[in-house]
């Protein structure tokens, strides 16, 4: 089942995300970042199992995803990951659909993702867009990304047809003509 994450899920969410980060598929997340953004997260939990002693073991979180609000008409789907042994069972799709429902609740029409999993997102109705047209705020994580100078992720967007367009009072700043600041290591 899918449910909003609670404080008890944070350690497991970090384990799932950082195991993918070690393979270069996602960015590492600190506990501080996860606590701060916990309200953005949903987890997929499988039921507990009946053991040999006929006791029921606790449920296990095997996937997570987060929806982060970027602007009046845009939210970013982040930190989507499913444990390797549970892939191909529709869990990734259900987590993305949770993000769609959350965007509907918030009345945010467009959802974007920066990803290497182009085919997966295309199946869920996302289309490739130019990174230059995404708001600058999306790039806040780039400062600490090892691939910031040669980003090879694809930007994809899906619009929810049932959420009305919003009249925006101000358009978000985009990275056109702007360089992303990089933190230089301190010299001894
Ligand atoms: C991408 C990921 C979340 C997919 O999770 P999953 O639970 O295996 O996906 P699902 O079983 O829900 O698949 C939904 C559909 O997408 C397809 N699909 C899944 N992964 C795919 C892939 N890598 N390429 C193409 N299609 C894919 C499935 O075949 C399925 O198609 P169907 O509905 O026609 O049967 C998972 O592979 C993952 O955790 N990857 C590593 C982390 C990552 O890259 N996350 C994305 C960060 S933006």
Image: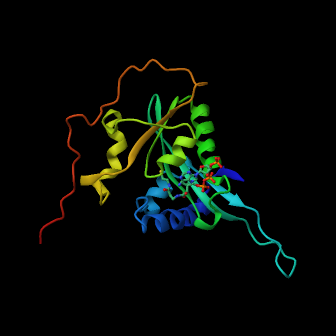
Q: Residue furthest bottom?
A: 53
Q: Nearer the viewer, residue 88 or 160?
A: 88
Left or right, 47 with reference to 89: right
Q: Residue furthest right?
A: 54
Q: Is residue 61 above or below residue 132?
A: below
Quadrant position of residue 132: top left
Residue drawn at 24 percent across, 34 percent down: 176
- Total numbered labels: 0
Residue drawn at 40 percent across, 59 percent down: 27
Left or right, 70 with reference to 16: left
Left or right, 123 with reference to 28: right
Q: Please state, as top left, top right, bottom left or bottom right, where the C terminus lies in the image.
A: bottom left
x and y, in percent, of residue 158 in the image: 51, 34
x and y, in percent, of residue 13 in the image: 55, 62
Q: Is residue 119 above or below residue 82?
A: above
Q: Nearer the viewer, residue 16 or 31?
A: 16
């Amino acid at each position: 089942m899918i449910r909003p994450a609670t404080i008890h899920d944070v350690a497991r969410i970090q384990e799932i995300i950082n195991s993918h980060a070690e393979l270069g598929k996602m960015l590492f997340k600190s506990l501080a970042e996860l606590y701060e953004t916990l309200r953005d997260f949903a987890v997929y939990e499988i039921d507990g199992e009946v053991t040999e002693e006929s006791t029921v073991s606790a449920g296990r979180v095997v996937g997570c995803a987060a929806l982060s609000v970027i602007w009046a008409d845009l939210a970013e789907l982040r930190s989507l990951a499913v444990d390797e042994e549970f892939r191909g069972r529709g869990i990734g799709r259900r987590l993305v659909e949770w993000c769609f429902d959350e965007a509907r609740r918030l009345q945010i029409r467009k959802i974007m993702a920066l990803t290497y999993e182009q085919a997966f997102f295309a199946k869920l109705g996302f289309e490739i867009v130019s990174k230059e047209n995404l708001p600058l705020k999306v790039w806040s994580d780039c400062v600490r990304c090892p691939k910031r100078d040669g980003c090879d992720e694809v930007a994809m967007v899906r619009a929810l047809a049932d959420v009305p367009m919003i009249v925006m009072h101000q358009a978000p700043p985009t990275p056109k003509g702007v360089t992303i600041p990089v933190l230089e290591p301190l010299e001894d």
